[in-house]
Image (spheres, helix red, strand yellow):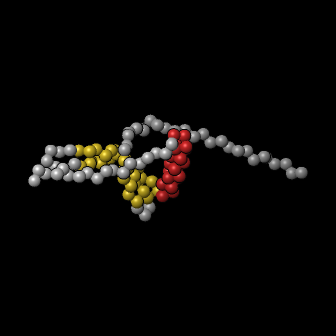
């Protein structure tokens, strides 16, 4: 019987450094795909009403995240799992489509 060292499983410590992290709220995202990567712009849709002009929405970008396609796929899988778990506990998340805005009719 040959003697040898049994293989040992080495544990790796994983630490998260949040010292440079900034937390912001985002109510919308713009995605820009390229051949090599995915660009994600997180920000706020801010409705603006200027007297005498049509209503408009300004997209104020707060953060940009660039990731390769493998990272984007892992993110998509993870988000899908999280949303499914949330809906199983709390019910379906309803995404409301923006309603078309009609210009006010004039007094002709």
Q: Is residue 31 found left or right of 55 in the rendered image? A: right
Q: Residue furthest left?
A: 108
**Residue 84 in view:** yes
Q: Residue furthest bottom?
A: 35
Task: In this rendered view, identify the residue nearer to me: 17 or 32.
Answer: 32
**Residue 82 in view:** no
Task: In this rendered view, identify the residue nearer to me: 56 or 32.
Answer: 56
Residue 37, above or below 93: below
Q: Residue furthest top?
A: 19
Q: Residue at x 17, y 45 (%)?
A: 50
**Percent x, y of residue 61:** 32, 47
Q: Residue at x 38, y 40 (%)?
A: 25
Q: Residue furthest right?
A: 1
Q: Residue at x 13, y 47 (%)?
A: 52
Q: Residue at x 26, y 51 (%)?
A: 101
**Percent x, y of residue 37:** 43, 58
Q: How many marks on residues? A: 0
Q: Is residue 76 found left or right of 45 in the rendered image? A: right
**Percent x, y of residue 70:** 51, 57
**Percent x, y of residue 84:** 53, 47
Task: In this rendered view, identify the residue nearer to me: 81 or 96.
Answer: 96
């Amino acid at each position: 019987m040959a003697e040898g060292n049994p293989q040992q499983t080495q544990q790796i410590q994983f630490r998260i450094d949040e010292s440079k992290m900034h937390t912001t709220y985002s109510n919308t995202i713009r995605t820009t795909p390229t051949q090599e990567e995915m660009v994600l712009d997180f920000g706020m849709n801010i409705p603006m009403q200027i007297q005498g002009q049509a209503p408009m929405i300004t997209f104020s970008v707060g953060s940009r995240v660039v990731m390769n396609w493998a990272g984007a796929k892992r993110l998509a899988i993870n988000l899908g799992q999280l949303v499914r778990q949330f809906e199983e506990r709390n019910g379906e998340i309803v995404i409301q489509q923006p309603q078309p805005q009609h210009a006010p009719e004039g007094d002709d």
